[in-house]
Image (tube, rainbow, N blue to C red):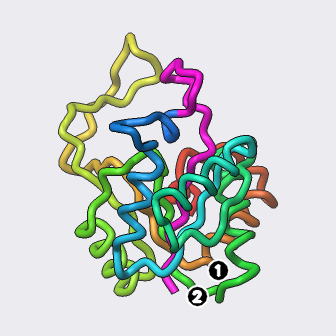
Amino acid sequence: MTIALLTAAGTGTRMGQDIPKQFLNIKDKPVIIYTLERFQRNPQIDAIAVVTLPNWIDFVKAYAKQFSISKLRWIVPGGETGQESIHNGLSAIAIDCAKDSAIMIHDGNRPMVDDEIIADSIAVFKEKGSAVAVIPCTEVVFNGKNSECARTEIPREELWRTQTPHTFTLEKLLWACEQAKARGLTGMAAMCQLM
């Protein structure tokens, strides 16, 4: 089984809006719905889970009904951090699904994911056991302790910027979350970093 786990529990404080960015309307449709529709239409995705802000759970349910998102099986309240939110989603999925299920974690506020990225992620996951979408780094990057003193340039040809989706087995993701808890690792920026 291949499950898309969409993260939509951020408050969007950097945008300075009253409404979290995943729920902003673009052409009379919330951003989260555009993202859900990408996974709804993809034949390789069997089910969808959304981790969201507790006060927005009913909105996600209503939007899913309004826009016919039939693959949505779980709507889970998020945690204090993205890492905790993902763990909440994984724990809910684990109640119903086999440990070898493929979990494709994707940001709910990134609707531009296309079928090619989803297919490539699944293909790499099947071949290698995990997959992380990346794009090449085109900027010149320096390493330094502060913005006043750069020590060395890092060749950009060796750098990749991670994107979502990140695809791993449910078992591996749960293991990583439990290891993080045991080791006191919190606030990881992305599951690929934690893995």
Residue 71 visible in the shown view: yes
Q: Position of residue 24 (x, y in %)?
A: 47, 34
Classify the position of the C terminus by image quarter.
bottom right
**Segment colored magenta:** 1-20
Judge the density around disc 1: few (<14), some (14-19), many (≥20) Cα neighbours within 10 Å.
Answer: some
Q: Is residue 84 magenta?
A: no
Q: Nearer the viewer, residue 23 or 100?
A: 23
Q: In the drawing, does residue 71 fall left or right of residue 185?
A: left
Q: In the drawing, does residue 181 fall left or right of residue 171?
A: right
Q: Which residue is mark 2?
A: 100
Q: Which mark is residue 171?
A: 1
| Quarter location, residue 45 | bottom left
Q: In the drawing, does residue 89 fall left or right of residue 169?
A: right
What residue is shown at x 59% (from left), y 22% (from top)?
A: 18
Q: Which mark is residue 60?
A: none
First along the sequence among labels 1 and 2: 2
Judge the density around disc 2: few (<14), some (14-19), many (≥20) Cα neighbours within 10 Å.
Answer: few
What residue is shown at x 69% (from left), y 71% (from top)?
A: 174
Mark 1 touches mark 2? (CB < 8 Å) = yes
